[in-house]
Image: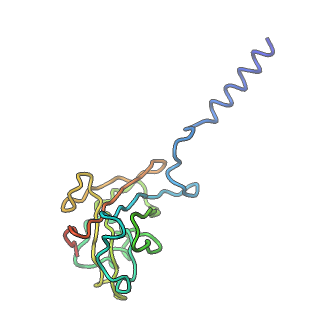
Amino acid sequence: MKLHTYLLIVSLLIFTSCNGGLEPNNTHSPIGKTYLTGIITYKGGKANWKFAQDSVVAIRVVAFKHYPDSSGILKDILTGNAFFTPTSLAFNVDSSLYSIEIPELPVEIVYIGVAQQYGADLTKQQRVIGVYSITGDNTKPSSIIIERDKLNRADIIVDFENLPPQPF
């Protein structure tokens, strides 16, 4: 009888401590933080990059709470309307992983774009080269609701032959 009680207690401890098994924990993020993550795939691979590398300062993913407009990315960032990758993504690659910390939760992100910065002026020298779109139509960006303890993923395809409309 003692053995059955002991096995029952051990089984209960094991089952209550397994709260998701091998399920991803939002991403590879520190505990308590929530990220928007994804893969950027460059159509045609690295052979299809259509710009001189020395003319581009950075490539970042920017996620907006409101559709961006001509007031510029800098204003959106300063007012808390936009979140972005802290460092530039790699150039001339087939694909890139990205991760953006989202401190406000839950929040709806209505526009996620891959932006190419081609000069020092952050407010004027930006070009969107890809957008998150569930349908694959880069003229119709998709929104996503970012929630705590969820896998918040938005994969993006960049097609240098078919760039999306510029929102700003």
Task: Check the image and report above or below for 53 versus 38.
Answer: below
* Viewer-nearest residue: 51 or 105: 51
**Residue at the limit of the structure toward the top, as seen here:** 1
- State how many labels appear: 0
Residue at horizontal 55 percent and vertical 38 percent from the top: 20
Which quarter of the figure is the N terminus placed in? top right
Residue at horizontal 23 percent and vertical 73 percent from the top: 69
**Residue 18's spot in the image, x, y percent?**
61, 35
* Viewer-nearest residue: 124 or 66: 124
**Residue at the limit of the structure toward the front, as seen here:** 47
**Residue 136's spot in the image, x, y percent?**
24, 55
Residue 138, picture quadrant = bottom left
**Residue 127's spot in the image, x, y percent?**
27, 77
**Residue 160's spot in the image, x, y percent?**
26, 70
Residue at horizontal 63 percent and vertical 30 percent from the top: 15
**Residue at the limit of the structure toward the bottom, as seen here:** 120
Task: Check the image and report above or below for 105 versus 78.
Answer: above
Residue at horizontal 49 percent and vertical 51 percent from the top: 26
